[in-house]
Amino acid sequence: MAASAKSKVRVPPAFVEPHAQAKCLSALHRQANSCERCELYKNATQTVFGEGHSGARVVLVGEQPGDREDIAGMPFVGPAGRLLDECLHEASIDRSLCYVTNAVKHFKFERRGKRRLHAKPNAGEIQRCAWWLGGEIDVVRPHLIVALGATALYALMGHSVGLTKERGQILATPNQVPLLVTVHPSYLLRIRNRNDRDSEHLKFVDDLRMISRYL
Ligand code: SF4
């Protein structure tokens, strides 16, 4: 059950300990713009910070910005973001009521000619960048956090958790904020078989429907 009033939701200052401290999201964002906590800032265009308002009751956490997000400077504006929007709409969830961010704020990629192909952030990069994710959660103080994929789940829990086993579940966390586990929308984009893709799409929408209880 969602808490009856936002003020009753207590988020200890150390969900991801230690983490960045700031009075508001824009101050955190400014700090993150000059982050050099890991090497990823060197090749990316810019820091892609979270987007949404500090009163959001739900925080959606993805993996890292992709090629489009890196250029635009906004999270979830590429193909996976469009699919997320579509699935949120099907689940009757208004994205504007959610704060949307990534576990890692700089785009990690490998060059193949003119193309920049997504490369998975490693454990050290995820842990380094949890500094900012913890700061965002501390400012927003959500009623629910949604881990979109294994990287987000790792960043939020601080250790490996079986995504397949926990998918569709709401986990208890040390900071009392429920954590909904589901896949990243890019997973759906990679499924070649149409029937499998349609079935996973429906499962993802079902997972997202659980958000409505916390809005
Ligand atoms: S990926 Fe995160 S920790 Fe690494 S430089 Fe960028 S903002 Fe800093």
Image (cartoon, grey):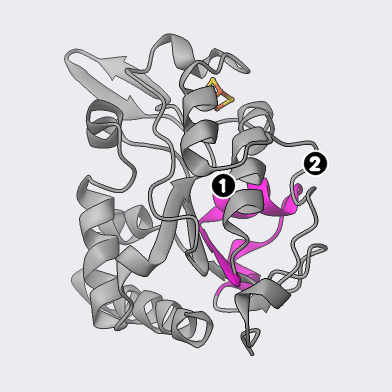
| Mark 2 within 8 Å of ligand 1, using the beta carbon | no
Label 2: which secondary element = loop
Asked if disc 2 and disc 1 are in contact, CB closer than 8 Å, the reply is: no
- Check residue 150 for magenta coloring: yes
Q: Quadrant of ligand 1?
A: top right
Looking at marks 2 and 1 on the same chain, the residue that comes earlier in the sequence is marked by: 2
| Residue under the image location 43 percent in, 44 percent down | 50
Query: What's the mark number on residue 151?
Result: 1
Q: Position of residue 38 (x, y in %)?
A: 60, 17
Three-letter code, disc 1: Thr
Residue 126 as seen in the image, left or right of residue 146: right
* Rendered view: 188 above or below 40: below
**Residue underneath mark 2:** 17
- Check residue 215 for magenta coloring: no
Asked whether residue 62 is in view, the answer is yes
Q: CA distance from mark 2 to mark 1?
A: 17 Å
> Label 2: few (<14), some or many (≥20) within 10 Å?
few
Range covered by the magenta-colored residues: 143-167
